[in-house]
Amino acid sequence: MRRALTLAAFAAVACCAPFITPAAAAAETARWQIEQPLPPAGPAGETTSIPIGLGKVGDIEFWAPNRGLLITEGNPPTIPAGLWAYNGVDWHELATVCGATDGRIAWAGPEEFWTVSNGRRGQAVSDTDEAPPLEDNTLCHFSGGKVIASYAKPAFEAASYQAMAAAACFGPDDCWFGGAELPEPQIGAFQLHWDGQSLDEEANPQGYPVESMKAFEDEVYEGVAIKPQFEPPQPERENRLGEPESPTSPSDLHAINPEGISPTFLRLTAATVPVYTEASEPSWSLQALTLGDDENSLWAAANPLPYNEFPAESDAHGSQVTIVRDAEGTWQQVLGPSHASNPLTTYIAPAGHDQTTAEIEAEHANQRVNAIAPEPGGEEAWLALGTEAEPPSPSAKVARVSPAGALNGAATLPSSQEREEGIGPKGKAEHIVCPTANDCWLVTSRGWLYHYANAQTRTLTEDTSPAFSHLISERPRDEGIPQVEAITLPSEEIVETRKPKKPGKTEQRRRVPLISHVTSRLVRGSTLELRFHLAVKTRIRLVALRHRRIVAATRRRVLRRGERHLLLRLDPKRWPSKIELQTHPLAPIPTVPVHKRAGARNAADFGAAPRWLSPTGGGGI
């Protein structure tokens, strides 16, 4: 197994590194350094010693210090979309399926986890020509070193899955996923719940998009994005489950109880969570809370809404980066408007006037929290920082924040030593996680990894679990999307004829395909539309079979040669496993010469029957 490329690999060979005694290792101060894995081997087995970015990483999560995962959209053609795993020694490619544009990971057990992943081509099964949304709207369930299930829904329908931005599990039989606000006229935020047997939609009736989730102690917490509201309360509407819901006051933080405990959803109000403490900072003036946790505390950070996005009807004049912390059941505001000075928010736009260029630049220079992660064994949390207006080649910035709101340990990455060795900026800080004390990982916007560690935590005991040691390259078909197993078409025939002009010579000819140029789709979710070209006039019937039994069929029809189509209504409760075209040509089928080159051209001209007839197509990630 190839090792990750560390700073030492840039600077010196391992044989020249000084011997570190246990006492010296304990005393060594942890520091950040780049530790980028090498790209996977190419198709021919070729390898390289030059690291590259892994592409946009949506999430990084750890079950244990030597068992971690990250999900990426990839960096083609070298890095495919998928997952990477950490085993305490290095990062390696784990899966070339279930990658995502901005995916999420939720651990359900030591060898079991879920991912929010991209959909696959062909997911649209309605009668629209609009391309279906594919970003972050399906789920993959991993267990025992393989994808045991994949979940999706057809696009453009009332029950279509919305894009998901959050995931968390109480355990193997109780997982939650959340995302975008439901489309009108439905009310609430899109939520899915796994109860160990099935995946069901359970919309949070309090609405607002869910953008962050963490399982902490006995609840799953959700950070939501509250939209500005200046209109009178809306009349009672129905949620996704058809239940009446009345408008409620907005809450920036929700909680979900474990399976079997009622109510399912809880609103944590300002009386419980001190996020908004000033009249000038209403609930909508902050973006969604980003959550981070360890075994003792839950932290949440929210960035201010940009000044130019404040509604004209509002008297509010600005907002500040706000950080809150729950330790032993008591919430406190760490940073925010209740503090005399906020080290992350140095400028707040004054009310009632247009900003000058200098004021806009000052506002854009305010720090923003992209991620937050408490470090186990201590009282502080690491922040992945950025600004609203980043330079073209930004560096990664991190700092620690204490419960009193003080910043320390600030660092700009790459470090000065790394820059002297020729390592340039690798993107802004986007994700941060701390599996244990003196052991944190940072992911940049370009898919580069920095490791905060000392000599004791830089390399750990290698995790040799078989579930994370081999490449996963297969993803099952999506449950929730109707699929047809295969289609059987008439086969071609080879016909031999003798040419009179060349005695003793035999010319091979073949009949053209009776059925060619086949395309298929599902219309309105359950009607199969099959389009094809007929070579001659034919008596034809389309038959759907399930385990050798006919479950649907068209009447026998006589169709002339040319472009034709058939419609077959299917029963979702008796979905077929195979589709057959039963044909009887009513005229001689034309033949064409069989030549090595001409044969290839003819096959392309007549079109090939699809191997699989499935709305999910088989492409995608």
Image (spheres, rainbow, N blue to C red):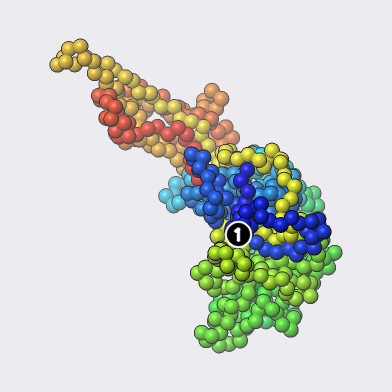
The reply to whether residue 139 is in sight is no
Quadrant in which residue 328 is drawn: bottom right
Q: Is 379 in front, or is 282?
A: 379
Residue under the image location 71 percent in, 66 percent down = 382
Residue under the image location 75 percent in, 76 percent down = 406
Q: Is residue 515 left or right of residue 310?
A: left
Q: Is 238 in front, or is 351?
A: 351
- Disc 1 residue type (three-letter): Ala
Q: Position of residue 311 (x, y in %)?
A: 57, 77
The reply to whether residue 617 is in sight is yes
Q: Position of residue 3 (x, y in %)?
A: 63, 48
Q: Is 40 in front, or is 516?
A: 40
Q: Could you tell me which secondary element the residue under label 1 belongs to? A: helix
Toward the left, the furthest residue is: 501
Toward the top, the furthest residue is: 504
Q: Position of residue 39 (x, y in %)?
A: 55, 49
Total numbered labels: 1
Quadrant in which residue 468 is drawn: top right
Q: Is residue 366 left or right of residue 464?
A: left
Q: Quadrant of the N terminus?
A: top right
Q: Is 578 in front, or is 457?
A: 457
Q: Position of residue 320 (x, y in %)?
A: 66, 77
Number of residues whose C-alpha sits closer than 10 Å to that of mark 1, classed few (under 14), some (14–19) or many (20 or more): few
**602 in relation to 311, above or below:** above
| Residue that carries the numbered disc 1 in the rendered image | 11
